[in-house]
Image (cartoon, grey):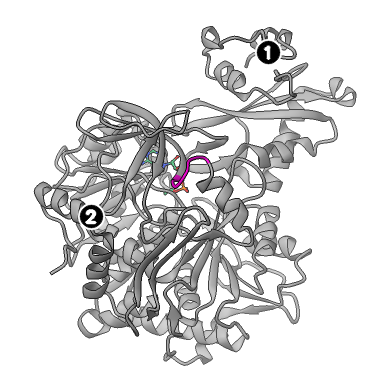
Amino acid sequence: MSNYHIKHLEEYYQVYRKSIREPENFWAEIAEEHFLWRKKWDKVLEWDFTKPAIKWFQGAQLNITENCIDRHLGTRANKTAILFEPNNPDEPAQHITYKQLSERVNQFANVLKEQGVKKGDRVCIYVPMIPELAIATLACARIGAIHSVVFAGFSAAALFSRINDSDCKIVITSDGSFRGKKSIDLKGIVDEALEDCAGVKTVLVVKRINSDIHMKEGRDQWLQPLLDKASKECVAETMEAEDPLFILYTSGSTGKPKGMVHTTAGYMVYSAYTFKNAFQYQENDVYWCTADIGWITGHSYIVYGPLANGATTVLFEGVPSYPDFGRFWEIIQKHKVTQFYTAPTAIRALAKHGTELVDQYDLSTLKVLGSVGEPINEEAWHWYNDTIGKKKSPIIDTWWQTETGGIMITPIPYVTPTKPTYATLPFIGVQPALMDENGQELKGNQVEGRLCIKFPWPSMARTIWGNHQRYKETYFSAYENMYFTGDGALRDEVGYYRITGRVDDVIIVSGHNLGTAPIEDAINEHPAVAESAIVGFPHDIKGSALYGYVTLKDIGESRDHNNLRKEINQLITDRIGPIAKLDKIQFSEGLPKTRSGKIMRRILRKIASNEMDNLGDISTLLNPEVVENIIENKL
Ligand code: WTA
């Protein structure tokens, strides 16, 4: 018997040791006993971090949707697979059973086939949090098309670059989306994005907000009539273990977003196994992750992980503040949610509204509280633990990344004793290492360094779409034979990990990764801007917020600064999306630079964070005089 479900701490240590000593045997047992294969693998693992090349379950054949849907039809046909809670609380929730999900995915898959989509083709999905988002995703997987879900809050320019980068031939979208009181014209954004995408021949449009939109002749089609005609049967495509399942873009510290490529078998096994254990999922639980499927958290822990376990997964269209800040708690009560998984930024925003709203609702069904996306601060941790969990639902602070595909460091609830702000212990099969500045591994406890992973795990991203070299440079070049995460971490006296934050130029704002370079590029497009530098600074709710230092060309000097600020933020909104807007924009005469001309962001970061007395030696700068000026004019 494999150790699919870990129930106590001793068992965790025992299984963990086994997963490290005999990783191949360990993962082969998990894979064999808990998943459906068309053909078993010839080799469990082949890896080389220098190339880098990672292959899990080579030779195996499968289809992930048979694991997420078909195999449950015998025993769970009438069980709710997706529980859809609409934006408007007065609109009834939808319980989509496994049988209905099967039919809807198959119909969607048949429509895609009819539109000429084939195995290996890329399909861009730009759909809000409605059932069709999950269904479209699974429909792609059913026929072996590679989905590229783009978060439906990204701008037309950001959507364009993602469609183009992976050469999508079809885009799935909706006539619009609801977000609280507002509705958003998604189709308009798609139209704008497609002005320059000659490769996209088809746009399928889901009707959601019933708005009067323009349908481009010969390109755009309403989805529903096509679905109505499509068969509810669709034989799943046979996929090789290492065939790509999806591409998901994540920000890098420099350059354009990276299309992380996840493959089929390893991703399936790891997302399902982590889901089962990290959430201690039991049959009849109602699990809710508040993330958007446009992010990795939604891919792994709204769609694939829960469905592979035959779970009921809640899909919420709205926002935590609508119709009021009690919405999350109302939903937990209404659907008797047992596991609740959200981000620290949401916890902080909700905590600000006190306990009165919380106290109106019955949260007694909750068993596990999850946190993801950024470090959770002590105050938020305690509020979550006391007010929401009533000190009886363990908090799992889950550290992982788009690149890792699944949870990497986390307590296992009711197994690992928790500690505020600590992600605690590595998950089964995960071998973390902390490295010092000289590339040496820091052994033992009570050390702090850069977080790396020494050994492959099944759901690691295999490459960056179209740019394997960048994959190698970003993740496998900082330290020899190690995957470098870009995060710093410490290990305490008992071996618990605490993630301290990014050590590169990625800033996490409200749980969203933002690279500084693309934002600076957007700002620098403004005709009055000479140069800019973006840094993060601490923010009560967002965790970090963005502070921009901007120098102006002559033509900008005389302009009204507040207008310029608005224009700069508008440019950022157009190029990336509103999530990347700057909280503060300071105009300065110059930016501190090294003698080789590199902007010293470290100094700017300290100034933005009010750590002026801790700037270090600035005398070696090319232009130390600007520092004083920047401090004087700090916002
Ligand atoms: C950060 C989200 C501290 C980290 C799943 C990581 C965290 C980046 C945590 C990945 C956590 C995520 N504690 N930091 N529990 N979870 N992070 O790709 O910096 O959107 O590298 O994946 O978020 O963000 P991504």
Residue 63 position (above or below residue 626)? below
Report if residue 315 is visible in the image.
no
The answer to whether residue 270 is left or right of residue 190 is: left
* Residue placed most toward the observer, 96 or 163: 163
Taking the magenta stretch, the answer to whether it contains residue 632 is: no
Instruction: Name the disc covering residue 21, or none.
Output: 2
Quadrant in the rendering for residue 48: bottom left
Query: Which image quadrant shows ligand 1?
Result: top left
- Please tell me which residue lies in front, 32 or 247: 32
Q: Give neighbour class at mark 2: few <14, some 14-19, many 20+ (Cα, 10 Å).
A: few
Relative to 26, is 38 on the left or the right?
right
| Dot label at residue 630 | 1
Question: What is the secondary structure assignment of the residue under circle 1?
Answer: helix
Q: Quadrant of residue 82?
A: bottom left
| Sequence-first tag of 1 and 2 | 2
Residue 216 at x, y percent in the picture: 74, 75
Which corner quadrant holds the C terminus? top right
- As helix, strand or loop, the secondary structure at mark 2 comes to helix
- The answer to whether mark 1 is within 8 Å of ligand 1 is no
The label shown at residue 444 is none
Q: Amino acid at mark 1?
A: Ile
C-alpha separation, residue under disc 1 versus residue under disc 2: 54 Å
First to last magenta residue range: 478-483
Point out the frontmost of discs 1 and 2.
Answer: 2
Q: Nearer the viewer, residue 52 or 143?
A: 52
